[in-house]
Every structure is written in C-alpha cells, then in structure tokens.
Image (spheres, rainbow, N blue to C red):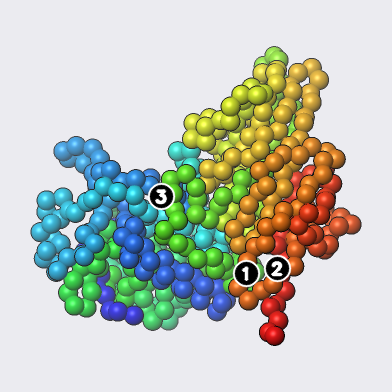
C-alpha cells in the first residue's frame, strides 16, 4: 500500500466497558470487506465522485447520488461546512491545501457520493454484509452516530426461529484518559488485539464530537474523514476517504476510545459476504444501485379504535427480505431486522394510506416513517390503498382495504425474481391467478443457469419446494412468492 500520512485533528464520540473478545470475522469475511472497501475508495476517487460531508447522506447510504450545491450552510459565526473536497489533481503540498482552506477550501457543485465517517461505516457494512446500522430520520434511514454505537454496545439480538438472545458486539478494547490523546497513543499498546473489521470509535468528552473507523491490515485503518491525506511524495490526495496507518492518526483530541467487534453468530460462518461490484457509472438520484426491489405486504389485520368513533387501526405485516439467509432481529424490538436475508435489502421503513384509486403516494412526503416490519396507520371508515416503502425509496404494490362496520381486505400478491440483480415482474395478482415464469436468463460467471426455484416468502413448506421452473411454466399464486435463479457448474468440453 502506498504510504500515507494523516493530518489535522479528527473529532470523536463515546465508549464503555470492555468485554472478552470473540473470534471476529472469518478469514473470508475479512477478505470480502477489505477487497470491497479498497476498490470502492479507488474507483470512487478515480471517478471523482467520493467526497466527505453531511449533505444528503441519507441518499448516499441507500446507494443513490446526491447533488452538492454548496459547501457551507448558515452565516457568519454559525456557518457550518457540509462538504469537504479537493481538486481532481489534489494539492501539491500541505501548505497549498492550508492556504486554500484559509479562504474556505475548494468546492465544485456537482453530483457525488457524500459520506461522513458514520455513513461510510454503515454503507460498507450494509453493502458487504447486509447489516443495517440505521434508525429513522427525515423520511429516510439515518446512520448511527458514534454515540449510538456506544448505546448499542450491549445490545442483544435474536436469530429467526430462536428465542435465545446473543450479543451484537464484543468490546475487545475500551479506555478512558485524564488528558487528550491521539488514536495512535490510545491503541499503540493494543494493536495486536485488533482484527480486520473492528469498529474503532473515539470521543472528545468536552465537545461531544466523535469519529469512527474500522481496522484494516498491517496496523492501518480505513475511514472517511474531513482531514487531508498526505501521500509519500508530499501531495494531498483528492479523496478524503482512505486507508491510512494508525500511527498517522496522531492528533491529541480524544479522552475515550473503544472498539466494537461483530460478535460470533451475527454472521453465518459459511457466509463470505456479498461480492456484487459497485459501479460508479451507474448511480442515479431516483434508484439505489443495490436495492431496486420493493418491499411487499404479507398480511393485514384491522383493529377497533377504543376512543375515536368510526376509526380503526390498520396493522400491516410487511417484509423487505427476499432471500434465504437467516435474519437477525433486535431483541428489544423484534420487528426490526438487523441483517438482511439477501443482497441489497434496506428494510421496510414507512406506511401510507390513500383513498382507493388515488395516485401512488409520494415517497418523501406521504409516508409515516418507522423502521419495522410491522407498520400501523390509523384511518377513518372508508376505502383505502395501503402501501409500504423501504429505506431506498422503493414502494410496494398496494393492498385495497375497506374499513367500516364490516372490513374487507383485497390482497395484491407479487412475484419477485432473485438473481444477481433482483427484479419484480411489475404485476399484481389475486388468489388463484396464474403466473407465467419469465424467459429471462440471468448470467453468472462460470455457471450455467438451469431455471428458477420457488421460494415462498412466508417460508412455509409446499409441495413445489425444490422444483425447478423454466421460462413459460405456469404457477398458481395465492401468496407473495419469489423465484430464485438456480445454477450448476459450467462443464468444460
């Protein structure tokens, strides 16, 4: 790796008690994490699309572009810098960077991937492992702040089908200091304890500011930072997301530092991580680069309102998990999955009820936001179309519901095809409708596609389980289903 030096103070937040360390990520998981992170940084820097900041991060974490129109918000003493950039060619020296910074720093309006330190960690772990480090904010998912990681340090999770709670994190390192120290000073005696993928968090007790990183190899770390990266030849790089030696993070700014490690059982040992490549030429404002599959409504119940006349609650059971991997849920909130079951799923996070036949609701303004697979909305008697949305902004097919003295629910079932890039057939079905299997042939390197295997989203066993369907085959539908691409090894002739 090209040697880099890390400059200037970096802010930080929060930590607590140390616990025994686990076996951490498997070797295959560590490899997947580092390969993706390094390629993501290299490709993003080369495309001049990857920058540090706080503007429209919610879109970026969901795999969308954001448009940066200014580098500062506010005025006078309350001005706050929201985008940190450098020219494409970088700076010739640290002095050149500092001179430019005196007048406000370089900025060019454009379409970018904008990530701060917490967004970067969330994005990497979601993209590679399907772990959702988020809460609901501003009609979108919002990354955990460094203080949130501190609060989550002792969180317990449940695996689907099990009642036994396990830890989300182990804490191999936790320290407090009477005086401000650097990240390197805090870790230098414990570098041998670090594992690839460990989440390193620091805190400044006085300011409450924080910074988050994850451990790489050879006493290096990977992070997004507002501080410039100085290359061995003395130049400042154009990208503020980088892999740097820990010894170069030497600003004396922190009085607490702790390390979180994904605990055993959060990821299956046979799961190496997702390897779908991230292509910086593909992101748009409208579509996520990795989640274009809408959530689906699995069931609905209607409950009387105890106090308001002619009013009822609609409880919607929704899902945004299409794959076969086991889900992990927060033990304290069992309707909120922590891990996805297939690549790219971002999770159900909102519900909307509109008059039956009205236009589809606006994804940013018409949904009540709550990250959960159980969504509840209160309505007056009437005819409604019920929708749910996911964190990437995909909207489900509606279910038609009549609420009154007598309630009626008209399901709208969907069919989703699971392959390298999941897709739905765009239709809705009712009980007894016949589905014609697509003629599409998804490609997979060194594999031969042999057909589609039925995967019922309610996970109940069925006589068709394991059967392979080919293009043109017919399936009777009475629930939401998915069809998973099935392959065999390509035979050498």
Dot 2 lies on which element? strand
Tell me residue 127's x, y (percent): 51, 61
Tell me residue 2's x, y (percent): 30, 79
Farthest residue, direction right: 463
- Residue 273 numbered tag: none
Q: Is residue 103 left or right of residue 382?
A: left
Q: Quadrant of residue 77?
A: top left
- Residue 444 numbered tag: 1
Mark 3 near mark 2, Cβ–Cβ under 8 Å? no
Of marks 1 and 3, which one's residue comes earlier in the chain? 3
Image quarter hosting the C terminus = bottom right
Tell me residue 24's x, y (percent): 54, 73
The residue positioned 69% from the left and 72% from the top of the image is 448
**Neighbours of disc 3 within 10 Å: few (<14), some (14-19), many (20+):** many
**Neighbours of disc 1 within 10 Å: few (<14), some (14-19), many (20+):** some
Which of pointers 3 and 2 indicates the residue nearer the eye? 2
Mark 1 near mark 2, Cβ–Cβ under 8 Å? yes
Where does label 3 land, which residue? 65
Of marks 3 and 2, which one's residue comes earlier in the chain? 3
């Amino acid at each position: 790796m090209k040697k880099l030096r890390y400059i200037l103070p970096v802010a930080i937040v929060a930590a607590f008690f140390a616990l025994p360390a686990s076996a951490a990520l498997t070797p295959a998981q560590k490899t997947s994490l580092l390969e993706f992170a390094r390629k993501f940084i290299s490709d993003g820097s080369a495309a001049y699309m990857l920058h540090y900041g706080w503007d429209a991060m919610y879109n970026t974490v969901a795999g969308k572009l954001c448009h940066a129109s200014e580098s500062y918000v506010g005025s006078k003493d309350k001005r706050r810098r929201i985008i940190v950039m450098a020219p494409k060619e970088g700076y010739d020296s640290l002095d050149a960077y500092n001179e430019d910074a005196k007048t406000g720093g370089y900025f060019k309006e454009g379409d970018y991937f904008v990530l701060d330190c917490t967004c970067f960690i969330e994005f990497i772990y979601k993209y590679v492992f399907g772990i959702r480090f988020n809460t609901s904010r501003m009609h979108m998912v919002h990354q955990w702040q460094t203080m949130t990681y501190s609060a989550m340090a002792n969180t317990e999770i449940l695996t689907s089908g099990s009642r036994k709670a396990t830890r989300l994190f182990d804490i191999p390192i936790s320290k407090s200091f009477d005086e401000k120290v650097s990240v390197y000073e805090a870790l230098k005696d414990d570098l041998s304890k670090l594992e690839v993928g460990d989440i390193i968090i620091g805190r400044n007790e006085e300011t409450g500011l924080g910074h988050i990183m994850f451990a790489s190899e050879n006493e290096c770390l990977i992070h997004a930072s507002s501080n410039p990266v100085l290359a061995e030849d003395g130049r400042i790089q154009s990208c503020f997301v980088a892999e740097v030696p820990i010894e170069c993070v030497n600003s004396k700014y922190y009085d607490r530092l702790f390390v979180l490690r994904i605990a055993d059982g959060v990821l299956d040992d046979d799961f190496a991580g997702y390897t779908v490549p991230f292509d910086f030429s593909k992101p748009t404002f409208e579509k996520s680069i990795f989640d274009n599959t809408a959530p689906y409504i699995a069931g609905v119940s209607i409950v009387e309102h105890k106090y308001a006349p002619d009013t009822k609650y609609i409880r919607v059971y929704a899902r945004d998990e299409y794959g076969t991997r086991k889900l992990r849920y927060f033990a304290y909130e069992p309707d909120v999955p922590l891990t996805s079951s297939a690549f790219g799923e971002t999770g159900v996070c909102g519900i909307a009820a509109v008059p039956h036949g009205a236009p589809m609701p606006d994804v940013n303004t018409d949904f009540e936001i709550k990250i959960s697979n159980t969504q509840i909305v209160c309505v007056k008697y009437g005819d409604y179309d019920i929708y749910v949305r996911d964190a990437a902004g995909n909207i489900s097919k509606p279910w038609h519901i009549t609420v009154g003295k007598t309630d009626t629910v008209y399901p709208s079932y969907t069919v989703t095809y699971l392959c390298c890039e999941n897709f739905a057939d765009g239709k809705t079905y009712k009980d007894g409708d016949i589905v014609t299997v697509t003629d599409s042939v998804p490609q997979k390197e060194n594999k031969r596609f042999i057909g589609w295997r039925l995967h019922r989203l309610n996970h109940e066993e069925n006589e068709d389980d394991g059967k392979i369907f080919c293009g043109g085959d017919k399936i009777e539908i009475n629930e939401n289903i998915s069809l998973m691409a099935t392959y065999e090894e390509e035979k050498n002739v």
